[in-house]
Amino acid sequence: MRRFVQRSPRLWRTNNWCASSSVRNMSTTTSTVLYALTVAPTSARPGPEDALQKSHHAKSGFRNPWDSFRDVGPKNAAQMFRRRFNGKGNIPDTTGPTVPVQKPEFLPSRDTPNLRATWLGHACYYVEFPSGLRVLFDPVFEERCGPFNTLGPKRFTKAPCQVKDIPVIDAVVISHNHYDHLSYKTVTEVAKRHPNCHFFVPLGNKPWFASAGIHSVTELDWWDENDITMSPSEGKGVEVEAVGEAASIAADIKARISCLPCQHVSARGPFDKYQTLWSSWAIESGGKKLYFAGDTGYKRVNELPDGEDYDDPKHNFPVCPAFKQVGEFRGPFDLGLIPIGAYAPRFIWSAAHAHPHDSVNIFQDTKCKQALGMHWGTWVLTEEDVLEPPEQLKIALKKHDIPEKGVFDILNIGESREF
Ligand SMILES: [Zn+2]
């Protein structure tokens, strides 16, 4: 077991958070407790047979071991360029108003009866667990997603907040190393402001973090699981400072984190394609289970004539089997955070990105009880109109006989929902 404790303990003054306009003012217990986070591998729980064979490990790097995948890379970008040149490609109009952006509100203490998720744009979610655990997924707060934060697409919706506005970050979870999911500037700022924060990444990403000066990193392979324990570090179970109505004794915060498969690729430059792993994640804490699907495709489609339905079962396009396995061996989940954007045209992007119809299949396969959409509304990455993903989601839900509202929902950027 490894122990990660900051060198010069600094107290988190939750009562100070209330002074911030971005924080909901609640008259519940506020406390300042410093936690030390420890991570330990758990004894193996049953998983699918093929997980033991490590068929996703390639001679060099990693691979998607399914018929539902085909290579995605520069040739797709060239295809997109040709379509634009020929006048076939759609250029999405980003003239506002598009997706509403609001200032997020974070809870003023770790006391939370429910699981609470806040969408911070694209694939970034901040999740407050009822145990008190606070996790940030795929944070990128820069204007552009690309090398040096200067190249690459520019936001068409504003970032709802910055790292400095988030009061507590115990863990950061990264799905893969593409620039719209992993930002040097953001993660180094999180590490600076939250020295106790621990980073969870898929296999092969640890050296990048080490070169960024971040060493509290756990690297996991698909189906690996770790137990997280956060213990009050200033005296056992004793609250350091408490104000409010019912000062409570701080107890250990426990969680289990699982690295799980998904269908995608990785690269930060021209020479490192597939060299680091991509993944989805599950976290169970305080009696609630969350699934974060990361960035993923669901099936591989071929080009069809205009007007043909890519989701008609008669085409029999190969489907990624990993999501049913996730549902069977790690589900059900109280909440799924599932990508719905960056899919058009589908015959180019289907292997790496989910169309909302795929998203609903992922939702059902993984046995999520409810879901929220992500991976849209922030940067134009593909050809669909910027407000199309939620419209397509409604159509897909209807096709699956799922109510349009209250099951798989869309938030405003900066909005929170409790489960
Ligand atoms: Zn990606």
Image (spheres, helix red, strand yellow):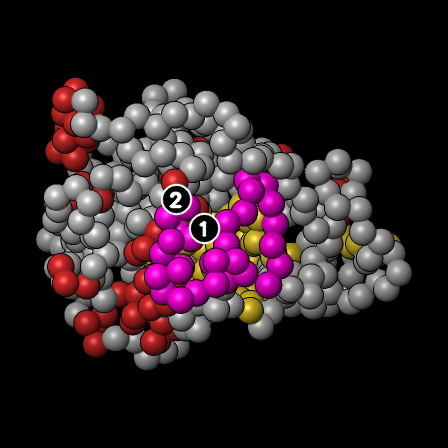
Q: Which residue is mark 1?
A: 373
Q: Which amino acid, by three-letter code, is at mark 1?
A: Gly
Q: CA distance from mark 1 to mark 2?
A: 9 Å
Badge 1 crowding class, 10 Å Cα cut-off, few under 14, some 14 to 19, many 20 or more, is: many
CB-based contact (under 8 Å), mark 1 and mark 2: yes
User: Where does residue 189 sit, x and y in percent of width and height?
Assistant: 53, 34
Asked where in the image residue 195 lies, by quadrant, the reply is top right
**Mark sitting on residue 241:** none
Q: Is residue 363 visible?
A: yes
Question: Under tag 2, what secondary structure?
Answer: helix
Q: Which amino acid, by three-letter code, is at mark 2?
A: Pro
User: Where does residue 391 sit, x and y in percent of width and height?
Assistant: 41, 46
Q: Is residue 72 visible?
A: no
Q: Which residue is mark 2?
A: 389
Q: From the viewer's perspective, is the residue at label 1 or at label 2 nearer?
A: 2
- Is residue 264 inside the magenta stretch? no
Answer left or right for 25 relative to 335: right
Between residues 137 and 313, which one lies in front from this camera angle?
A: 313
- Is residue 397 inside the magenta stretch? yes
Compared to 67, does 119 lie above or below?
above
Between residues 162 and 154, which one lies in front from this camera angle?
A: 154
Between residues 361 and 176, which one lies in front from this camera angle?
A: 361
Indicate yes or no: mark 2 CB to ligand 1 under 8 Å: no
Answer left or right for 43 relative to 104: left
Q: Who's the residue at 74% across and 50% down the image?
A: 108
User: Where does residue 409 sit, x and y in percent of width and height?
Assistant: 50, 54
Between residues 336 and 60, which one lies in front from this camera angle?
A: 336
